[in-house]
Image (tube, helix red, strand yellow):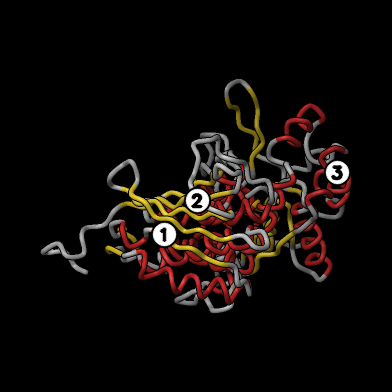
């Protein structure tokens, strides 16, 4: 294959195009899919090289390298060991049409051209070189706190949303959680000594199910990024994710003010009844007896709607859904408790129950992230009778009738 010559970036006169293979977790097949796309382009005459790849000993992935030019890594010493990193200088000199770059979130060895591999990717794109790369959903910067709430682990490496938003194509590489766990057991993802720990921690079925749904929602969400409001008809998890990513990209701004809970509950209840078709009895207590909370009204309604939806979906036939407001022991907070039961609602001080159903875990994580935008929290708990509760805690707003305060 003949490579172009001349000043960097002049071969095609445009920034490179970015294609991302996105997955829910390691082992879903992102690298294999990236190599498959590389072969497809090479077969139609495109100049394709492999800038960096880590096969992790997977034979099928290693076989996919046949016929592709692999650029030798640049070896760097670090703390008495040698590490191979992508040779960005060599790629900029060679200037192929397309470079395959595995593990975009990777942190480079100190002392190189860039601290992060995503910065290497950005530099290749600026030089007019197309890039195909791989990313796990837990590496998306805007979702790092959501992922931590799902898995209990903060992602050590992230990719900025700015880079992901500029991608010309994002392909979701998907696989059932049980298939992924079997791959793990068979040694196709991690070395044998790491398998047991992975199965009982990150690769738990509930984690994988939640991350899988998060990846699917984020991929679909890209098509809605130009909208000013969440389109009508979106499922609540999708609408929550749209709201969260819009807030973090600056596409949606919050305008907090004092909000009385009775002003937003009727609309939230109508939305949930329309979405679920439920005619469950809802008993609202004490919401008029607590101070107004300080929040963005639209964002507050989104959170309350989601929590009410979850509670109504949990309700057993004949059960009542309770909403009870109270001033928190801390005077600067108001609690809104959501519960199902047959008589009363009262959160216990018992250990917070685990949420082991994947989609429910995702919805809770998204709702907690949205509440955090308003300096609030969402905490699962149990009633004395063992029914699940959700408690939304929000800061108290200035008094609505306080002189000098905007309503």
Residue 232 seen in this snapshot:
yes
Q: Neighbour class for label 2 at 10 Å: few (<14), some, many (≥20)?
A: many
Q: Neighbour class for label 3 at 10 Å: few (<14), some, many (≥20)?
A: few
Picture disc at residue 252: none
Which residue does the numbered mark 1 point to in the structure image?
285
Q: Is residue 244 above or below residue 78?
A: below
Q: Return the disc, 3 or 1, that comes first in the chain's sequence.
A: 3
Eye-nearest disc, 3 or 1? 1
Q: Secondary structure at mark 3?
A: helix
Eye-nearest disc, 2 or 3? 2
Q: Is residue 32 above or below residue 45?
A: above
Q: Using the numbered discs, state the Cα–Cα distance from disc 1 to disc 2 in whole angstroms.
A: 10 Å
Left or right: where 63 falls relative to 396? right
Where's residue 170, x and y in %?
Answer: 66, 65
Q: Return the disc, 2 or 3, that comes first in the chain's sequence.
A: 3
Q: Using the numbered discs, state the Cα–Cα distance from disc 2 to disc 3 in whole angstroms.
A: 42 Å
Residue occupying the point 43% across, 56% down: 324
Where's residue 62, x and y in %?
Answer: 85, 46
- Circles 1 and 2: CB atoms closer than 8 Å: yes
- Circles 2 and 3: CB atoms closer than 8 Å: no
Where's residue 96, x and y in %?
Answer: 68, 60
Which sits in the foreground, 280 or 100? 280
Which residue does the numbered mark 2 point to in the structure image?
345
Which residue does the numbered mark 3 point to in the structure image?
182
Left or right: where 328 falls relative to 66? left
Q: Return the disc, 1 or 2, that comes first in the chain's sequence.
A: 1
Q: Using the numbered discs, state the Cα–Cα distance from disc 3 to disc 1 in whole angstroms.
A: 49 Å
Specify the quadrant that holds the N terminus: bottom right
Q: Image quadrant of residue 35?
A: bottom right
Specify the quadrant that holds the C terminus: bottom left
Q: Secondary structure at mark 1?
A: strand
Which sits in the foreground, 347 or 249? 347
């Amino acid at each position: 294959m003949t490579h172009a010559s001349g000043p960097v970036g002049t071969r095609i006169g445009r920034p490179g195009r970015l294609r991302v293979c996105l997955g829910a977790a390691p082992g879903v097949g992102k690298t294999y899919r990236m190599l498959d796309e590389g072969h497809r382009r090479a077969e139609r005459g495109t100049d394709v090289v492999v800038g960096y790849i880590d096969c992790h000993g997977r034979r099928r992935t290693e076989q996919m390298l046949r016929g592709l030019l692999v650029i030798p890594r640049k070896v760097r010493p670090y703390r008495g060991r040698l590490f191979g990193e992508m040779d960005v200088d060599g790629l900029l000199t060679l200037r192929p049409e397309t470079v395959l770059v595995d593990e975009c979130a990777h942190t480079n060895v100190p002392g190189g051209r860039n601290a992060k591999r995503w910065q290497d990717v950005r530099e290749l794109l600026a030089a007019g070189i197309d890039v195909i790369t791989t990313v796990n959903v837990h590496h998306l910067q805007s979702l790092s706190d959501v992922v931590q709430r799902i898995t209990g682990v903060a992602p050590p490496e992230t990719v900025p949303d700015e880079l992901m938003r500029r991608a010309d194509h994002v392909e979701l590489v998907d696989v059932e959680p049980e298939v992924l766990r079997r791959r793990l057991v068979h040694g196709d993802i991690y070395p044998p000594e790491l398998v047991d720990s992975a199965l009982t921690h990150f690769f738990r079925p509930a984690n994988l199910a939640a991350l899988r749904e998060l990846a699917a929602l984020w991929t679909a969400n890209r098509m809605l990024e130009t909208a000013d409001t969440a389109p009508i008809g979106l499922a609540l998890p999708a609408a929550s994710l749209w709201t969260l990513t819009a807030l973090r990209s600056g596409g949606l701004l919050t305008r907090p003010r004092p909000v009385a809970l009775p002003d937003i509950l009727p609309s939230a209840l109508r939305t949930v009844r329309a979405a679920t078709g439920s005619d469950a009895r809802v008993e609202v207590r004490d919401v008029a007896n607590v101070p107004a909370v300080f929040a963005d009204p639209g964002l507050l309604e989104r959170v309350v709607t989601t929590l009410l939806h979850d509670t109504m979906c949990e309700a057993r036939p004949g059960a009542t859904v309770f909403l009870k407001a109270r001033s928190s022991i801390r005077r600067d907070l108001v609690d809104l408790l959501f519960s199902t039961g047959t008589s009363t609602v009262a959160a216990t001080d018992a250990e917070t129950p685990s949420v082991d159903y994947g989609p429910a875990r995702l919805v809770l994580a998204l709702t907690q992230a949205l509440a955090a935008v308003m300096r609030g929290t969402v905490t699962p708990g149990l009633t004395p009778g063992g029914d699940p509760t959700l408690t939304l805690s929000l800061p108290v707003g200035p008094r609505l009738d306080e002189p000098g305060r905007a309503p």
